[in-house]
Image: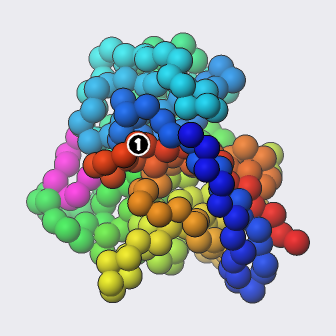
């Protein structure tokens, strides 16, 4: 089922046209929480203790294949990144009580090669809490490294962590903190455009949910403390956006969970200044 929405927004005093195409996904993807390209189609995963599998599907929302990742465990898979050699599954969902945060390294055939263990240098207590700062749901490939963006339930900021793409154990210290005023749920980076995009969720005092595209143009770690971004509200209701993939300079694909009823969804978002 396709649905279209067309709205006009005023982010940072720049008029933009935001068009959304909506496609229902099969219920087997009810907890879809990542999005990457794989052999000309999409690939995703389910979070929150789902099966240790990846699922490929096309732009019509049709499942093409399932890939069990032998040797892995899905404790709380939250993101998927890729480069020319590998895929990286981020098992980093954390409400403050995990000591087993892992990033799985897969080859281009989706066979498990190795893993990376991480912890947060400043985390001293491991007890589940509502306003945890050590959750993370956005992993992107950035040159020879991975960038992990926190989902800060306490301050609605995001801390940026650098992780080498090599197996080992790493204690993370953020290289920067960005005041996005959102809970970061997904991300992607395009090295040709030097464009970073994150998805974020904000809850108002009336518990109304607002969701955003957060765009960083000319993203540069050398100037990390002076980066700026544009924030665009996504006109989507009754959906928790969990993943994003850059298509071109003005087009993005997103997925959302089913929110306990209905269907998970794939969205195509076209954003152009005029």
Q: Looking at the image, is 59 positioned above or below residue 17?
A: above
Q: Looking at the image, is 13 positioned above or below residue 245?
A: below
On the image, which quarter does residue 37 sit in?
A: top right
Residue drawn at 47 percent across, 77 percent down: 181
On the image, which quarter does residue 90 sit in?
A: top left
Magenta stretch: helix, strand or loop mostly: loop
In this image, 118 relative to 228: left or right?
Answer: left
Residue drawn at 41 percent across, 60 percent down: 238
Q: Rate crowding at label 1 as few (under 14), some (14 to 19) or many (20 or more) other CA atoms within 10 Å.
A: many
In this image, 92 relative to 128: left or right?
Answer: right
Foreground pick, 178 / 42 = 42
Q: Quadrant of the N terminus?
A: top right
> Residue 262: where, in percent of width, then height?
36, 46
Q: Residue furthest left?
A: 127
Q: Is residue 252 visible?
A: yes
Foreground pick, 48 / 122 = 48
Residue drawn at 71 percent across, 59 percent down: 19
Q: Looking at the image, is 218 positioned above or below residue 254?
A: below
Look at the image and say whether residue 96 sits in the magenta stretch.
Answer: yes
Q: Which residue matches tag 1?
A: 263
In this image, 38 relative to 258: left or right?
Answer: right
Q: Element type at marker 1?
A: loop
Look at the image and say whether residue 230 sits in the magenta stretch.
Answer: no
> Residue 191: where, in percent of width, then height?
74, 46
> Residue 69: where, in percent of width, then height?
37, 18
Q: Which residues are magenta?
A: 93-100
Residue drawn at 47 percent across, 63 percent down: 237
Q: Quadrant of the C terminus?
A: bottom right
């Amino acid at each position: 089922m396709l649905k279209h929405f067309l709205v006009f927004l005023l982010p940072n005093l720049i008029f933009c046209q935001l068009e959304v195409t909506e496609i229902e996904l099969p219920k087997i993807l009810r907890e879809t929480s990542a999005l990457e390209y794989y052999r000309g189609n999409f690939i995703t995963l389910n979070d929150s203790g789902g099966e240790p599998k990846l699922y490929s599907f096309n732009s019509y929302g049709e499942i093409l294949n399932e890939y069990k990742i032998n040797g892995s465990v899905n404790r709380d898979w939250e993101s998927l990144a890729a480069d020319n050699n590998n895929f990286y599954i981020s098992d980093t969902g954390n409400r403050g009580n995990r000591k087993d945060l892992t990033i799985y390294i897969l080859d281009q055939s989706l066979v498990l090669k190795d893993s990376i263990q991480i912890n947060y240098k400043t985390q001293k207590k491991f007890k589940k809490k509502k306003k945890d700062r050590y959750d993370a749901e956005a992993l992107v490939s950035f040159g020879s490294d991975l960038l992990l963006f926190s989902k800060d339930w306490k301050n609605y900021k995001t801390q940026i962590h650098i992780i080498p793409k090599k197996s080992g154990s790493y204690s993370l210290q953020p290289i920067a903190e960005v005041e996005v005023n959102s809970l970061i749920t997904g991300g992607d980076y395009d090295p040709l455009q030097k464009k970073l995009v994150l998805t974020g969720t904000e809850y108002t005092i009336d518990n109304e949910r607002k969701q955003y595209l957060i765009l960083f143009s000319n993203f540069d770690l050398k100037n990390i403390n002076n980066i700026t971004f544009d924030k665009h509200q996504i006109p989507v209701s009754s959906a928790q956006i969990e993943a994003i993939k850059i298509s071109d300079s003005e087009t993005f694909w997103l997925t959302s969970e089913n929110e306990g009823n209905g269907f998970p969804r794939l969205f195509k978002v076209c954003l152009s200044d005029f």
